Image (tube, rainbow, N blue to C red):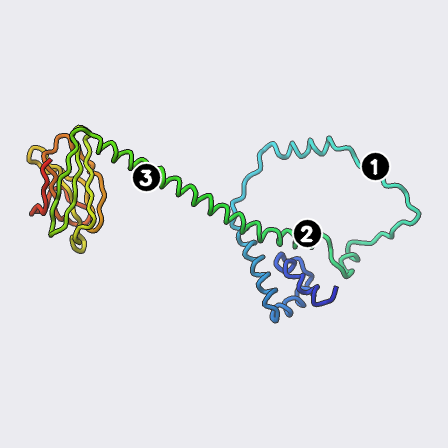
Amino acid sequence: MNESHDVHDSAALYAVDALEPEERARFEEHLRECPSCRREVAEYAEVGAHLAGAVAQEPPPSLREDVLAGIRGTAPLPAPAPSAATAPVVSLEERRRRPGRRPGRWLAAAAAAVLVPSVALGGWALGVRGEQRQQEQLAAQAQQEQARENQLLAAPDVVTRTLELDGRTATVVASQQAGAALVVSAGLPDPGEGREYQLWLMQDDVPVPDVHFAGGEVRTWLEGDVADAAAVAMTVEPAGGSASPTLPVVALAEL
C-alpha cells in the first residue's frame, strides 16, 4: 500500500480524532490539496454533529444487574496451551511508538464510515413515514368531509339559496332538520385590505354572528344553529369578524 493511499484512508481517523500528532499534521497538509478528502471529512463531521444532537436515553435500572448476572454465569476461558516460542512482552508505550495501524483506530473509522449511509437512510425512512401519516390524515379528513356533505344533501328539507355580490355568487346549501348549512363559491370579490366577509344567522330578526372569511374561493360550514334561522345575511367586517354587523348588508338569502 503506497503512502498516497494511506493518507487518503486517514479521512475517517481524522474526523474521529484518532490520528497521532505527526499523522494529523501530515494529513492536514494533504487536506489542503485534496478535495475528495475534504468532502469525506465534512461528511463524517456532519454525522458527528447529528449524533451529538441526539437525545440520550437513560438505561433501565435492571441493565446493570443483567450484565453482572451474565458475567457471573459465563465460564472462564481455558488457559492457553504452552508454545515452543513465547512472544516477547512489549510495553504499551513501546507499542504506541511502533508504526502501523492500531485495530481500535480502524474500528472507530469503520463505525464512522457505516454511520454516514445509515443516518441518511434513517432520515429518508422517517421522512417517508411522516409523509405517509400526513397523507393518511388528509384522506381521513376528506372522507369525513364527504360524509358530512352527503348527510346534508340527503336531508329531506335541503334547500339551495344564492347570495349575490357584485356579479359574483355564493351558494348556501342548508337543512333546518339537519341543523347544518354549507356555503360554496368559486370566487368572491376581494373585500379589501384588513377586511373579511362575515355571515349572520337571522333568528327572530336578530343577527347572530357566524363564520368570516376572505374573498376568492370559499367552502365553509356555518357554525351556528340553522334550525331556528330564517335567513343568512352577509356583511363586510374588519378582519377577525365582529360581534354586531356593520351595515349595509351586502347579500341576503332566506331559508
Foreground: 79 or 246? 246
Binning the other alpha carbons within 10 Å of mark 3 as few (below 14), some (14 to 19) or many (20 upward) gives: few
Look at mark 2 in the image and give the residue it sits on. 107
Distance between the Cα atoms at labels 1 and 2? 27 Å
Across and down, in percent, residue 250 comes to 9, 47
Foreground: 166 or 60? 166
Q: Secondary structure at mark 3?
A: helix
Foreground: 93 or 107? 107
Foreground: 3 or 19? 3
Look at mark 3 in the image and give the residue it sits on. 142
Q: Identity of the amino acid at label 1?
A: Pro
Look at mark 1 in the image and give the residue it sits on. 78
Q: Residue at x 72, y 67 (%)?
A: 3
137 displayed left or right of 230 = right
Looking at the figure, which quarter contains the N terminus?
bottom right
Q: Identity of the amino acid at label 2?
A: Leu
Distance between the Cα atoms at labels 3 and 1? 69 Å
Q: Are marks 3 and 1 in contact (CB under 8 Å)?
A: no
Q: Earlier in the sequence, mark 2 or mark 3?
A: 2
Q: Identity of the amino acid at label 3?
A: Ala
Q: Earlier in the sequence, mark 3 or mark 1?
A: 1
Across and down, in percent, residue 41 comes to 59, 61
Q: Residue at x 8, y 36 (%)?
A: 206
Distance between the Cα atoms at labels 2 and 3? 52 Å
Q: Secondary structure at mark 2?
A: helix
Across and down, in percent, residue 213 comes to 20, 46
Write down the quadrant of residue 36 in the picture: bottom right
96 displayed left or right of 215 = right
Write down the quadrant of residue 100 in the picture: bottom right
Looking at the figure, which quarter contains the C terminus?
top left
Depth-wise, is mark 3 or mark 1 nearer the camera?
3
Q: Residue at x 15, y 42 (%)?
A: 199
